[in-house]
Image (cartoon, rainbow, N blue to C red):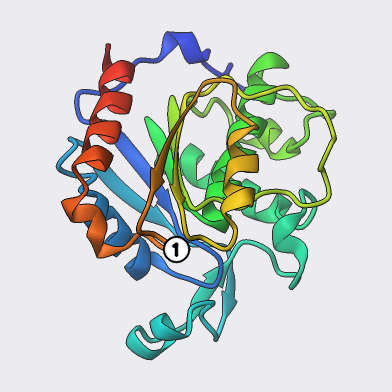
Amino acid sequence: MGKLMSLEAVGLSAQPRLLCLSGHASKRDVTECQAMVLELERHGMELDYLDGPFETPTALDPTIQDQIPGPFYVWSDAPRGRHSREGLRAGVEHVLRYVASHGPFDGIYGFSNGGLIAALATEAMEQALAAGGGSAASPVPVFQELGAPAPWRFVILACGSCILEEEGEERPRLRTPSLHLVGAKDQIRARSLRLREMFESSDLYEMPYAGHCVPIACIEDLDLKAALKLFLGTLRG
């Protein structure tokens, strides 16, 4: 098995590759719309997309159900598993296997539950790096099978969710730089802010017009464009 590269050893590519994760009971079509509204390609990124590993016939958002044919995809096969580490383990492994086979990626974008998956995959990556590539005691043993997947360097999390049963539990904060896009009118805004607390180095942009979505109004938001440009510019050095 190869050795995982350190975070410090990997710089951003000339055209950074970004893996985009869909939300709960959603699919690639929706994530593509989010990426278009955020103008991620205009920020110089090459985009790839990944849905959750489990199918569901029903979209979380009824308006999506009316506009886009199913199936849709979820990150946990248990109805309440999308808010627990154990319930999301298969979803995290799904991402790590995809990175190993289709990477390297410079960053990961995730919306809602996909944002939580991105954070948990980043946690698994950092723990594997600290352990020298993973071991039987690794929180995600799949690292034993993956050879030497290159670590990603940043995450962008939009309207992210969080683990619910860990309130008050102390865990080491993640070192990977993160940008958190939070909807000021989002019913899970508090969860998005709690997700941000997982990271040691995090930037925050609150979309004053947004609920639990990446709305088309983002296209006209010059401050949002500036926040993305500043975050990525800092990473490029």
Give percent across and percent down for residue 52: 54, 62
Residue at x 57% of width, y 63% of height: 187
Q: In this view, does 187 lie to the left or right of 153?
A: right
Element type where label 1 sits in the image: loop
Image quarter (top left, top right, bottom left or bottom right) of the C terminus: top left
Residue at x 18% of width, y 42% of height: 222
Tell me the amino acid under the disc marked 1. Gly
* Between 26 and 100, the one nearer to me in the picture: 26
* Between 172 and 54, the one nearer to me in the picture: 172
Q: Is residue 99 above or below residue 150?
A: below
Q: In this view, does 175 lie above or below 222?
A: above
Q: In this view, does 32 lie to the left or right of 181?
A: left
Residue at x 65% of width, y 41% of height: 194
Q: How many marks?
A: 1
Mark 1 crowdedness (10 Å alpha carbons): few <14, some 14-19, many ≥20: some
* Between 135 and 65, the one nearer to me in the picture: 65
Give percent across and percent down for residue 64: 40, 81
Image quarter (top left, top right, bottom left or bottom right) of the N terminus: top right
Give percent across and percent down for residue 115: 53, 49
Q: Can residue 104 be seen in this view?
A: no
**Residue at mark 1:** 211
Q: In this view, does 139 lie above or below 58?
A: above
Give percent across and percent down for residue 193: 59, 42
Q: Is residue 227 left or right of residue 70?
A: left
Q: Is residue 173 visible?
A: yes
Q: Is residue 147 left or right of residue 213?
A: right
Residue at x 51% of width, y 80% of height: 59
